[in-house]
Image (cartoon, rainbow, N blue to C red):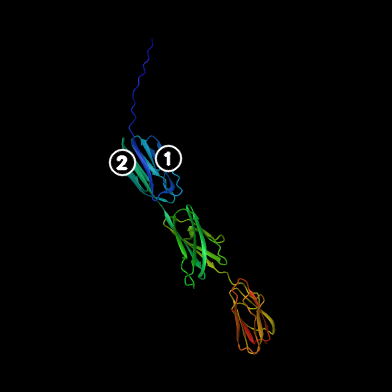
Amino acid sequence: MITCKFLNERVTAPPTGKVIIQKQVSPTHAQDFNFQGTGPNNWNQPFQLDDDLGASGGNNQLPKSRAFDVPPGNYTFKETPTNGWTLTKIECSPAANASVNLNGHSAQINVVAGQTTTCYFTNKQNNAEIRIIKDAMPNDLKDFGFTGGGPNFSQAFILDDDAGVPGASNQRQNNQAFIVPAGQQYVFTEALASPWVLTGITCTPANAAIVDQPGRKVTITPVANQTVTCTFRNKPPPPLPCLGNYPMNAMVNFFAPGWQTVNICRGGTVTFNKAPGISFTVTPSTPPSSFTPIPMGVGAATGTTGPFPNTGTTPITYKYWSAAAAGQGSIIVW
């Protein structure tokens, strides 16, 4: 007979200690943070944490903390620097088990068998200020629409620059500021504001923004604690050129007797002056609905007829019949 005996001996697992690494941000945010843990016997553990409970864009896929059961010894846990964030504090409990190096983004932990050491890594988001300014030249009641966009940032707003203008309501401002996370790109665009023309965009500091004037926009990448100011300058369109004989801001004598014409630019006004005993009739080539031809007979007193303003967007041509000899009257275009 052959007898076999199986002998078993209980093997006691080596004692371990526990390390808990926890991430804290205020307010909570969807940003993920990378960590690296190293220790004796080539122990190496990369991992990720976040603190996104209730945060916009948070998905709760990553934990807020990680726990490690490891043999006694010295272990180092380091957070990888994250663009747009500052590690403001590392606190460990019990404090006697850890040595903190805030500048090095790390905590060295002496793991003691049977003990738990918890370290909290606290981060603060780096913010910056972006200020958009409207400069209308000259000041005017015109409103200008803007949009701003970036990571988790979307804004639509209206500015005007009507200080000192009659009828100004002061309900809108000529500038608006936004506090945003630093290190991200933000695009601000001015909507078309016909007939006003966008004549320039300037930003300070210039190296924080890329100006695209044809696209009516700026792309701003602010750094932490920086204020970036961008000014959008607009002007109304210039008066349309006069097509006839009389430029703006000019006074000219009547020509020889006969039909004569004068063109009034957008924003311009014509005034006809005559001497006694001279007859002529003023009428637009394309009369406005409110216009009545005005004859000035031979017996009319010295004076003027008009002014006839053009508040439209195209020139108006006025014709007049003059029985006057040259120099017996004048036309003022202004």
Q: How many marks?
A: 2
The residue singled out by tag 2 in the image is: 97
- Circles 2 and 1: CB distance less than 8 Å? no
Above or below residue 261? Residue 61 is above
Question: Which residue is outermost to the left?
Answer: 96
Write down the residue under mark 1: 46
What x and y, as percent, mark residue 117?
Answer: 33, 40
Amino acid identity at mark 2: Asn
Residue at figure coordinates x 33%, y 44% from the top left: 92
Q: Residue furthest right?
A: 258
Relative vertical location of residue 89 with respect to residue 131 in this rendering, above or below: above
Q: Nearer the viewer, residue 262 or 93?
A: 262
Answer with the quarter of the image where residue 5 lies: top left
Q: Secondary structure at mark 1?
A: strand
The amino acid beneath tag 1 is Pro
User: Can the viewer see residue 211?
Assistant: no
The percent position of residue 192, horizontal first and vertical second, equals: 56, 63
Q: Position of residue 202 (x, y in %)?
A: 50, 63
